[in-house]
Image (tube, rainbow, N blue to C red):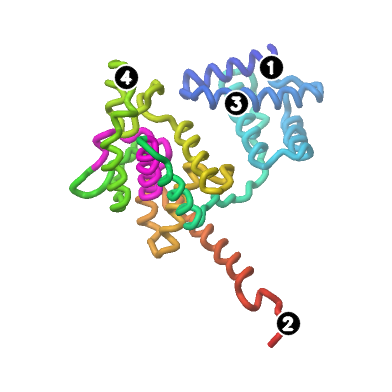
Amino acid sequence: MSANRDIALFLDMMAAERGAAFNTLEAYRRDLDDIAGRLAARGTALADASTADLEAVLAGLASDGLSASTAARRLSAMKRFYRFLLSDGRRGDDPAAALKGPKKGRSLPKVLSEADVDALFDAAGRIEGANGVRTRALMEILYAGGLRVSELVSLPLNAFVRAERCIHVTGKGGRERLVPLTPNALEAVDAYRAVRETHLPPEAGRAKRAQRFLFPSRTAKSGHMTRERFAQILGDLAVAAGLDPARISPHVLRHAFATHLLARGADLRSVQMLLGHADVSTTQIYTHVLDERLKTLVQTSHPLARGSGGD
C-alpha cells in the first residue's frame, strides 16, 4: 500500500474517531508527507520504517536547520501514525514508541510597554465616526479584561453584568468567568452601543443572527466580527501609532494586560482567574517575563553595569 494511502487512512481515523479539525488534519498530512519523502530517499516505505530509520529522519531535520518545535511536531505525527498502524493490525510493533524529541526552550511571550499601549489607544482615538467608536470599545475591553481574541469578537450582547460592572466570558473548555472592566472600558462600550446598529447587516436574515453579538459583522457567516478582521484593525492601529505591526497581535495585548497587572502588584492567582487559565503554571510565564525585564533594566541602567571606570 502506498504512503499516500496509508496517510489517507490515518487522517480518516483522526477525523472520524478523534474529531480532528481540518487544519489539524492538514498539519498531520504535511508532516507525514515530509517524513514519507525522507524515508523514501533512504529506500524505505513509510509503513515499513524501523526505529533506526525514524531516528535518521529526526537527525535529518536537525541537520537541515529546522527548529526544535518543528522536529517535535514531526515526532508527534510519527507517534500517532505508528500507533494507528499497530492498533489497525498493520504492524506488530511501534517503531516510534522509544523516540524522544529535542527539548524546546521555553519562549517568553512578546510584551508591549505601557507606552506602546498608550500609543495604540491614542491612534484609536484619532479614528473618526462609528468605526472609531467601535475600535475604541474593542481595545478597551481587550486590554481592560485580558480577553482572548476569540472571546472578544464573539461576546454576546447580554455579556455585560451592569450591576457588577463586569462581563460574563465563556472561555476555553466552556469555562466561565466574570471579568471586571475599568470605567474607561464601560464608557467606551456605552458610546459604542449608540452606533452599534450601523455595523449590522442590512439583510433581515443576517441581521437576526448578528443581533446576538456585541460586535456584529455585515459579512461573516458567524454573525460576529472575525478574529482576522480584528487582527487587521489592530495592525492598522499599530502603523498609525508608529509601531511595528509584526510585534502587535491580539494575544500580545493579552500578554501586556497580564504583565502590566503583575508589575503593578497584582497577585498571580488573581491574574490566573482574570485570564481564565485552568492551571496557575500557565500564568507563571508572566513572572518570567518580569524577571527578564528586570535583568535587562539592571544590565542597561545600573551604574555598575556601565563600566564608567571612576570611583
The amino acid type of the residue labelled 2 equals Gly
**Closer to us: mark 4 or mark 3?**
4
What type is the residue that disc 1 sits on?
Ala
In the rendered image, residue 7, in percent from the top left (x then y), is placed at 63, 18
| Residue depth check, mark 4 versus mark 2: number of the one nearer the observer | 4
Secondary element at tag 2: loop
Looking at the rendered image, the disc whose residue lies closer to the viewer, 4 or 1, is 4
Q: How many marks?
A: 4
Residue 6: x percent and y percent?
64, 16
Counting residues from the start of the chain, the first of labels 3 and 2 encountered is 3
Q: Are marks 3 and 2 in contact (CB under 8 Å)?
A: no
- CA–CA distance in space, label 4 to label 2: 72 Å
Residue corresponding to mark 1:
3
Q: Residue at x 46, y 31 (%)?
A: 229
Q: Amino acid at mark 3?
A: Tyr
Extreme-right residue of the structure: 42
Q: Are marks 4 and 1 in contact (CB under 8 Å)?
A: no
The answer to which image quadrant residue 29 occupies is top right
Q: Secondary structure at mark 4?
A: loop
Magenta stretch, residue numbers: 131-160
Tell whether position 276 is magenta. Answer: no
The relative height of residue 297 versus residue 93 in the rendered view (above or below) is below
Task: Tell me how far mark 3 sits from mark 1, CA to CA.
Answer: 13 Å
Q: Earlier in the sequence, mark 1 or mark 2?
A: 1
Are circles 4 and 2 on residues that touch, CB within 8 Å? Answer: no
Residue receiving disc 4: 202
**What is the three-letter code of the residue carrying label 4?**
Pro
Local crowd size for mark 4, using a 10 Å CA cut-off: few (<14), some (14–19), many (≥20): few
